[in-house]
Amino acid sequence: MVVLGIILLIVGFVTGLSILWTIGIVLVAIGAILWLRPAMGHAVAGRKHYW
């Protein structure tokens, strides 16, 4: 999710489409949360590891 978000951020910046920029920011934020929560020892969606 983080990689897809970064790709959308780049494409949105180059093309000037603000909707891609917004979706990219949201995907990066969600991906970072899903990546960092298990690293802190918290279960995500009832699972110790999320992938």
Image: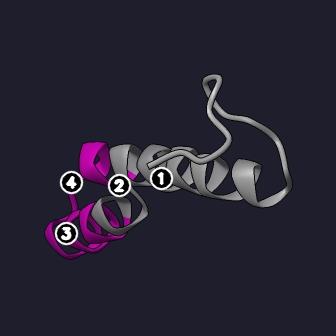
Which stretch did the figure color magenta?
Answer: 6-21
Q: Give the label, 2 or 1, closer to the camera.
A: 1
Residue 13: image x %, image y %?
Answer: 29, 70
Query: Which mark, residue 11?
Result: 3
Whether residues under marks 2 and 1 lie with C-beta atoms below 8 angstroms apart, the answer is: yes
Q: Do the residues labelled 1 and 4 touch (CB within 8 Å)?
A: no
Residue placed farthest to the top in the image?
A: 46
Q: Mark 4 points at which residue?
A: 17
- Mark 4 is on which residue type? Leu
- Look at the image and tell me in which quarter the N terminus lies: bottom left
- Pointers 2 and 4 in contact (C-beta within 8 Å): yes
Nearer to the camera, 27 or 46: 46
Magenta-span inclusion, residue 15: yes
| Amino acid type indicated by mark 1 | Ile
Q: Residue 25 shows which numbered tag?
A: 1
Front in this rendered view, residue 51 or 29: 51
Query: Mark 4: which secondary structure?
Result: loop
The location of residue 47, given as percent across then percent down, is 62, 33
Report whether 49 appears left or right of 37: left
The numbered mark, 3 or 4, whose residue comes first in the sequence reads 3
Residue at numbered disc 2: 21
Look at discs 3 and 4 and give the one toward the viewer. 3
Report the Cα–Cα distance between label 1 and label 3: 12 Å
- Label 2 sits on a secondary structure element that is helix
* Mark identifier at residue 43: none
Amino acid type at circle 3 is Val
The amino acid on which the numbered mark 2 sits, given as a three-letter code, is Trp
